[in-house]
Amino acid sequence: MTARRPRPTAADRARAAAEDVRARPCPRCTATTLVARTTDRVAALDVRADPTPLEPVAEILARLDGRLTWCLIEHEHVGRRLRWRDPWHIAAGRCPHTVVADHRCPPQPVQETLL
Ligand SMILES: [Zn+2]
Ligand SMILES: [Zn+2]
């Protein structure tokens, strides 16, 4: 009996690549944003976030404004990942991660919205 470790499938590799946090320009406003799929296996989301880390008060304001916030986690081996922030993470001082919020495009000049 030889116990073989399952080899990563193409789907595993594709999922890992999708979870890599990359800096990409927003297609609408061209601001630099962070894009990644969250590591949640049940309801993974494709996130586009602003790269600016948020202080606790700024996070509260962002959430009051209807933006979701995310833990930006640095893994030694696999790189950066975005993770859903549940209330446990949000409670002050409990989580050591960098916090970022959903990207929201700044208001466009009227001329551009008419085109
Ligand atoms: Zn966290
Ligand atoms: Zn944008």
Image (cartoon, grey):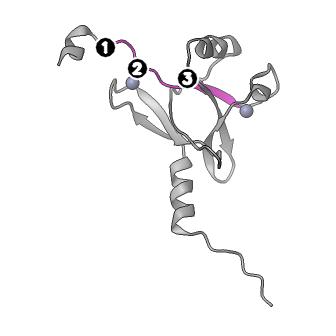
Q: Earlier in the sequence, mark 3 or mark 1?
A: 3
Q: Is residue 68 left or right of residue 114?
A: right
Numbered label tally: 3
Q: Is residue 5 above or below residue 41?
A: below
Please, what secondary structure does the residue beneath circle 2 have?
loop
What residue is rendered at 51% in x and 50% in y? 18
Amino acid type, residue under disc 2 in the picture = Cys
Amino acid type, residue under disc 3 in the picture = Thr
**Viewer-nearest of discs 3 and 2:** 2
Q: Is residue 77 left or right of residue 108?
A: right
Cα separation between marks 3 and 1: 21 Å
Q: Are marks 2 and 1 in contact (CB under 8 Å)?
A: yes
Tell me: is circle 2 under 8 Å from ligand 2. yes
Q: Which image quarter is the N terminus in?
A: bottom right
Quadrant housing residue 63: top right
Q: Is residue 46 left or right of residue 5?
A: left
Location of residue 34 in the rendering, given as x and y in whole percent from the top left corner: 49, 34
Range of residues picked out in magenta: 97-107
Amino acid type, residue under disc 1 in the picture = Gln
**Viewer-nearest of discs 3 and 1:** 1
Q: Which residue is mark 1?
A: 108
Location of residue 64 in the rendering, given as x and y in whole percent from the top left corner: 61, 11
Q: Which residue is mark 3?
A: 52
Q: Are marks 3 and 2 in contact (CB under 8 Å)?
A: no
Looking at this view, name the residue that lies furthest to the left: 115
Q: Is residue 41 above or below residue 106?
A: below
Cα separation between marks 2 and 1: 8 Å
Q: Which residue is mark 2?
A: 105
Location of residue 61 in the rendering, given as x and y in whole percent from the top left corner: 62, 10
Quadrant housing residue 66: top right
